[in-house]
Image (cartoon, rainbow, N blue to C red):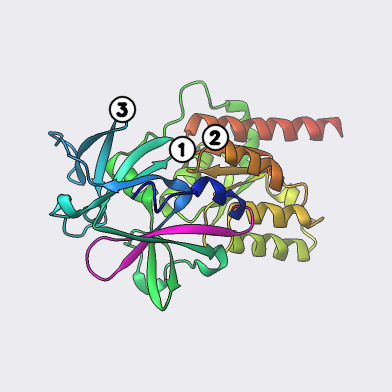
Amino acid sequence: MSGGILDGVDQRTQLVGKNRLELLLFRLGGEQIYGINVFKVREVLPCPKLISLPKAHPAVKGVAHIRGGTISILDLNYAIQRPPIQDTSKSFVIITEYNMSTQGFLVNSVERIINMNWEEIKPPPRSFGKEHYLTAVTHVEDKLIEIIDVEKILAEISPRSEEISEGILDADIGESARELHVLTCDDSSVARKQVGRLLEKIGVQVTSFSDGKQTIEHLRELADQDIDVCKKYVMLVSDIEMPEMDGYTLTAAIRKDPRMDGMYIILHTSLSGVFNQAMVQKVGANDFLAKFKPDDLAARVQNRIKQLGLEIAET
C-alpha cells in the first residue's frame, strides 16, 4: 500500500502555493469518508502487530515497531468519541507527522488520493455544533468528506505544555504591548486558543480568524477605510492548511496589495520540512515556525515588538 497509493508524493509539491492540496481518503467504518492532507502522511500500511501500553490513553491502541522506530498507534474512531475499531487484522495504519512528532492512525480502510483546490474545502456547517472534531468538509462525487481536526485529537491524547519558560517574557515589552495588536489565522480551534493564550501572556491584543479568506477580506475592508493595517497589527501569525484559502495563498495575496505589502507574516504550521522553508521565501513570508513551541513563538513576537520600537525611535 505504501509503495502504491503514496507513490510519487514527492513530485506533488508543485501543488502547494497554488491553493491546491491532495487528500488521502479513508473510512473509519460505515459509509462516512474522511480525508487527510497527503503532505502530513509518511506511509500507509496494513496494521502491524501492536504492543499494548499499560496506563496509556484509551485511544492509544498500542505501539508498533516500524522501520527501526517505535510509533504510537491511535484508534482514530475512538479518538473522535465513536466505537473503537475491533478487528485490527483487516485495518490500516496511516503514519503521519504533526507538530514535529510521528504517530499512526488506525483506520478501517484507505480509499484513494484526490487532487483539490482549497476553495473547495469549506468550514464545517454551523449545524454540526461546536463539539465536533472537524476543521473542514468538502464534497467529492456528491459524497461528504470530513477533514478531522488532528491537532485537537493530539491535544486531548497527549497535551503539550503551553507554558512559556522562565526568563523568556520581557516585562518591559509587556508594558508597551498593551496597545499593540496581533492578527492570527488558523482553522483548528485548539491552535487558535493556544496561540491566543500565549499572545495574551505577552500582553498584546488578539484578533483571530479561522481561514485565509476571512483574513484577507478583513484586511481589505480595513484598507478600504484608509486604515494602515501594517500599523494596526504588529504581525500576522497564520496557519498554512486552511479551508478556502491556505496560508501560502493568503501571504501572496497580501504581498500583491500595496496597501498591506509591508505586513510582517509568520507562517505557523504543523507541516514540517525544508520544502516549507522554501515556500516561505517563495510567497514572501517573513518567518516560518513549526507548531507548537511556546518559547519560540513568544520570542519571535517580542523580537518583532522590539524591532518596531527601534524603527519608531529612529524616525
Res. 43 image quadrant? top left
Q: Secondary structure at mark 1?
A: loop
Q: Nearer the viewer, mark 3 or mark 2?
A: 3
Against 15, residue 137 (above or below) is below
- Can I make out residue 228 in this image? no
Answer above or below: position of 245 versus 76.
Answer: below
* Furthest residue in direction front, as rendered: 4
**Which of label 3 and label 1 is nearer to you?**
3
Query: Marks 3/1: CA distance?
Result: 26 Å
Q: Residue 34 appears at what percent x and percent y?
A: 35, 62
Q: Quadrant of the C terminus?
A: top right
Instruction: Give the class, few, some or many, for how many residues have Cα within 10 Å of label 3's Cα (few <14, many ≥20).
Output: few
At x 31%, y 27%, the residue is 68
- Look at mark 3 in the image and give the residue it sits on: 68
Q: Is residue 87 above or below residue 292?
A: below
Q: Is residue 252 left or right of residue 34?
A: right
Amino acid type at mark 1: Phe
Describe residue 103's horizontal placement relative to residue 222 as left or right.
left
Disc on the earlier residue, 2 or 1: 1
- Which residue, given by chain and number where applicable, does mark 2 sit on? 297
Q: How many marks?
A: 3
**Element at label 2:** helix
Residue ID at (48%, 33%):
294
Question: In the rendered structure, which amino acid carries the disc numbered 3?
Answer: Gly
Which region shows up in magenta? 16-34
Residue pointed to by mark 1 = 292
Q: Is residue 158 magenta?
A: no
Query: Could you tell me how far apart the alpha carbons at marks 3 and 2 are, in whole angstroms?
Result: 32 Å
Instruction: Look at the numbered discs 2 and 1 and tell me whether their residues touch, using CB distance below 8 Å.
Output: yes
Residue shown at the point (80%, 35%) measured from the top left: 312
Mark in the foreground, 2 or 1:
1
